[in-house]
Amino acid sequence: MDLFERLNQSIIEEYDNGELHLNLVAPLQQVANNPDQFSDKLSIVETLLKQVNAFEPYCDCGCFAEGFNTKDVLKTLSQLGINPQL
């Protein structure tokens, strides 16, 4: 399974588990479903995969200090030229 397939699988799993917000799914899938468009930015896509896998909606609150939140994912998406309106 390549990087983009892993990203797509992680998006689905994290959404199904109730961690990933619905409003992040479409912009993330825009990356996962367009490997040709983002093949020159693999390190950023790898970062995005790590963020999705460790997504914690409340990571900036108290004991949930580990993981990544919506702001982290949005920042990485912006490095790929994707700026969703939330």
Image (spheres, rainbow, N blue to C red):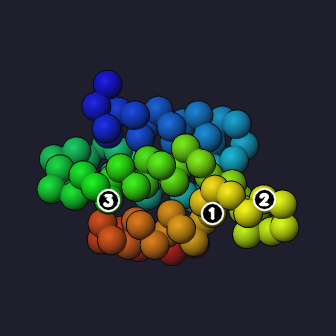
Q: Amino acid at mark 2?
A: Phe
Relative to 7, say whether 65 is above or below: below
- Toward the top, the furthest residue is 1
Q: Amino acid at mark 3?
A: Ile
Give the quarter of the figure containing the C terminus: bottom right
Which of the 4 image quarters holds residue 83? Answer: bottom left
- Residue at screen point 38% across, 72% down: 78
User: Callout 1: few (<14), some (14-19), or many (20+) C-alpha neighbours within 10 Å?
Assistant: many
Which of these two is toward me, 38 or 72? 72
> Marks 2/3: CA distance?
24 Å
45 to the left or right of 56: left
User: Callout 3: few (<14), some (14-19), or many (20+) C-alpha neighbours within 10 Å?
Assistant: some
Q: Position of residue 74 (x, y in %)?
A: 49, 69
Q: Is residue 20 visible?
A: yes
Q: Position of residue 42 (x, y in %)?
A: 24, 52
> Marks 3/1: CA distance?
16 Å
Which dot marks residue 44? 3
- In what element is the residue under mark 2? helix
Q: Where does label 1 land, which residue?
A: 69
Q: Is residue 37 visible?
A: no
Q: Position of residue 44 (x, y in %)?
A: 32, 59
- Residue at screen point 73% across, 69% down: 60
Q: Earlier in the sequence, mark 2 or mark 1?
A: 2
Q: Amino acid at mark 1?
A: Asn
Q: Where does label 2 land, which residue?
A: 64
